[in-house]
Structures are given as structure tokens and as C-alpha cells.
Image (cartoon, rainbow, N blue to C red):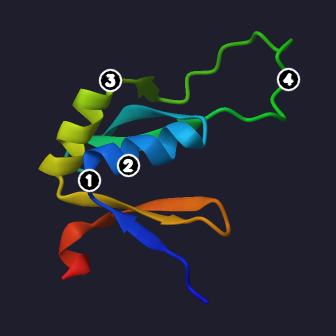
């Protein structure tokens, strides 16, 4: 049975991510022509991460506010598709919903 749900309302998206101990983030990526664009990310706390490891790695992900993240989500016409049974998510284009 497919339990996937697609969330488009800002409040629903924010609640799902927060309930799963996630935060919004954006990374900047360049295409082959050197043009920069925003790529939406979600960062989740991982219980298996060693808190004594204080080394900093630049993974290219910058935390951002919910307002900035949701504005970019709307600009790119994306939605959040979640599978509660598997605790997975993906960003999908809204036009795929029609």
C-alpha cells in the first residue's frame, strides 16, 4: 500500500520537517555554464553522529530561515513528497501533481 503524501501547504511542510527534527537549508550549485542556482535541502539531526567530533566539514549546505526556504520552494514550483512508512522524502515538481 502506497502511503506517500505530497505536501504543498507551507504549514504542513514545516510541521513535517520539524516533527522529524529537520531544518531548512539551501546550497548554491553551478550548471555547466557557470550559472548559479539555489538547490533546496533539508538537514536532519542524526543520532549516530559523534558529538565529540568537532571537525568542521563544508558540505556546501547553508542553513536558512523558513521564509527564505519556502519562498524558493514556491519560486521553483516544488512540493514535498513524504513516505511516512519509510520516513523518506523528496522534492517533486508541482506540475506532476496535476
Under circle 2, the secondary element is: helix
Quarter of the rendering containing residue 41:
top left
Q: Is residue 43 visible?
A: yes
Residue 38: give x, y in percent of width and height: 26, 39
Under circle 1, the secondary element is: loop
Q: Which mark is residue 50?
A: 4
CB contact under 8 Å: marks 4 and 3: no
What is the spatial separation of the Cα atoms under label 3 and label 2, in whole angstroms? 14 Å
Q: Of circles 4 and 2, which is in front?
A: 2
- At a point 81% along the width and 29% down the height, the residue shown is 49
Q: Which residue is mark 1?
A: 9
- Counting residues from the start of the chain, the first of labels 4 and 2 encountered is 2
CB contact under 8 Å: marks 2 and 1: yes
- Counting residues from the start of the chain, the first of labels 4 and 3 encountered is 4
Quarter of the rendering containing residue 8:
bottom left
What is the spatial separation of the Cα atoms under label 2 and label 1, in whole angstroms? 6 Å
Residue 55: give x, y in percent of width and height: 74, 12
- Counting residues from the start of the chain, the first of labels 3 and 2 encountered is 2
Residue 27: give x, y in percent of width and height: 38, 34
Badge 4: how crowded within 10 Å, few (<14), some, or many (20+)?
A: few
CB contact under 8 Å: marks 1 and 4: no
Q: Which residue is mark 3?
A: 65
Is 53 left, or right, of 61 in this rendering? right
Is 15 left, or right, of 84 in this rendering? left
Amino acid at each position: 500500500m502506497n502511503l506517500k503524501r505530497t505536501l504543498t501547504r507551507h504549514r504542513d511542510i514545516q510541521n513535517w520537517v520539524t516533527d522529524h527534527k529537520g531544518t531548512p537549508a539551501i546550497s548554491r550549485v553551478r550548471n555547466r555554464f557557470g550559472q548559479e542556482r539555489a538547490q533546496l535541502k533539508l538537514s536532519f539531526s542524526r543520532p549516530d553522529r559523534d558529538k565529540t567530533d568537532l571537525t568542521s566539514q563544508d558540505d556546501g549546505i547553508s542553513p536558512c530561515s523558513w521564509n527564505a526556504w519556502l519562498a524558493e520552494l514556491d519560486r521553483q514550483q516544488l512540493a514535498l513528497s513524504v513516505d511516512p512508512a519509510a520516513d523518506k522524502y523528496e522534492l517533486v515538481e508541482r506540475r506532476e501533481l496535476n
